Image (cartoon, grey):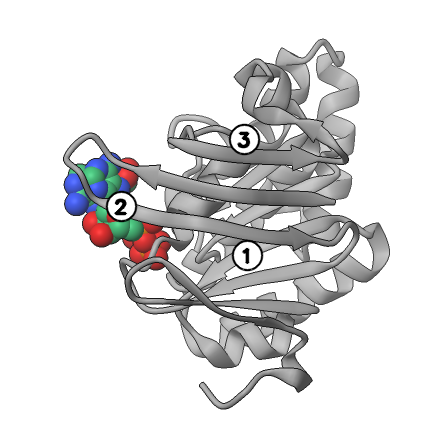
Amino acid sequence: MIEFEGVTKRYPDGTVAVEDLSLKVETGRITVFVGPSGCGKTTALRMINRMIQPTSGRILIDGDDVTSRPDADLRRGIGYVIQGAGLFPHRTVLDNVATVPVLQGVSRREARASARELLERVGLSANLGDRYPSQLSGGQQQRVGVARALAADPPVLLMDEPFSAVDPVVRDDLQQELLRLQGDLGKTIVLVTHDIDEAIRLGDKVAVFAQGARLAQYAAPADLLAV
Ligand code: ADP
Ligand code: ADP
């Protein structure tokens, strides 16, 4: 479980992006942060793996206060997927997925073998492994991004607008893939989107952020009041 306890983030210029946020993200479920642009979703997400440091309040993961954990140590357990996939442009698809495990001490041979399995799991055929990211479609790149995040086998996956850079047909397909992956692997997923339909389709729990960094609702999709 990931717990925000009275978390506030004030940027150096005075912008309060998140104010006194308290919520619990359940283990093994998909929690969606949804709301208009600029309401603090990305800031909240990035505080989970300390890409951004809270100004005040605490974040606990499985009861462990990560506000005091070394960043590198923490990130090892938390995968991160962003819009546009953020792949290494000068590495092949296979190496994009295999690089992090190799850095963590897995043998190159082993890392490449599991990279091939992961690519298949996210619905990419093995013969795309030798291509470079620029030779893939947006949807394919996004799949590689998910495979890369999964390569370190993190219990927690943070996803920031992972479907917004792809066309609607591919998006539906990727969303189905994510639900299937979630069912198979049981990861704890926190997903950020501005699309309420996507939030309702994918979320076990949906946190609706309002402008001004307020948490307006936090409920299962069926229990949400009209938004
Ligand atoms: P969202 O993900 O919902 O679009 P963000 O978390 O990106 O929201 O941003 C929340 C607010 O904080 C916005 O007003 C944004 O302009 C501001 N913000 C984000 N990053 C920074 C930063 N590095 N410095 C100052 N303000 C920022
Ligand atoms: P996103 O795709 O998450 O909405 P943005 O385009 O809002 O990304 O932000 C891109 C980068 O710019 C982030 O690192 C964010 O922290 C920073 N940023 C966003 N808003 C501001 C702001 N008002 N002032 C300074 N930096 C900002």
Q: Amino acid at mark 1?
A: Leu
Residue bearing the label numbered 3: 96
Local secondary structure at mark 3:
helix
Local secondary structure at mark 2:
strand
Which mark lies nearer to you, 2 or 3?
Answer: 2
Relative to 100, residue 186 above or below: below
Which mark lies nearer to you, 1 or 2?
Answer: 2
In the image, the residue with mark 2 has its CB under 8 Å from the nearest atom of ligand 1: yes
Local secondary structure at mark 1:
strand
Within 10 angstroms of label 2, few (less than 14), some, or many (20 or more) residues?
A: some
Q: Residue at x 72, y 9 (%)?
A: 105
* Spatial CA span between label 2 and label 3: 35 Å
Count every numbered label the image shows and give the total: 3
Relative to 93, residue 32 above or below: below
Relative to 98, residue 83 above or below: below
* Spatial CA span between label 1 and label 2: 21 Å
Q: In the drawing, does residue 32 fall left or right of residue 155?
A: left
Q: Quadrant of residue 74?
A: top right
Q: Residue at x 76, y 17 (%)?
A: 109
Residue 47: % across, % down: 47, 36
Q: Amino acid at mark 2?
A: Val
Q: Residue at x 75, y 14 (%)?
A: 106
Residue bearing the label numbered 2: 16
In the image, the residue with mark 3 has its CB under 8 Å from the nearest atom of ligand 2: no
Query: Upstream in the sequence, badge 1 or badge 3?
Result: 3
Q: In the drawing, does residue 137 fall left or right of residue 5?
A: left
Q: On residue 191, which mark appears?
A: 1
Q: On residue 46, which mark appears?
A: none
Query: Upstream in the sequence, badge 1 or badge 2?
Result: 2
Which mark lies nearer to you, 1 or 3?
Answer: 1
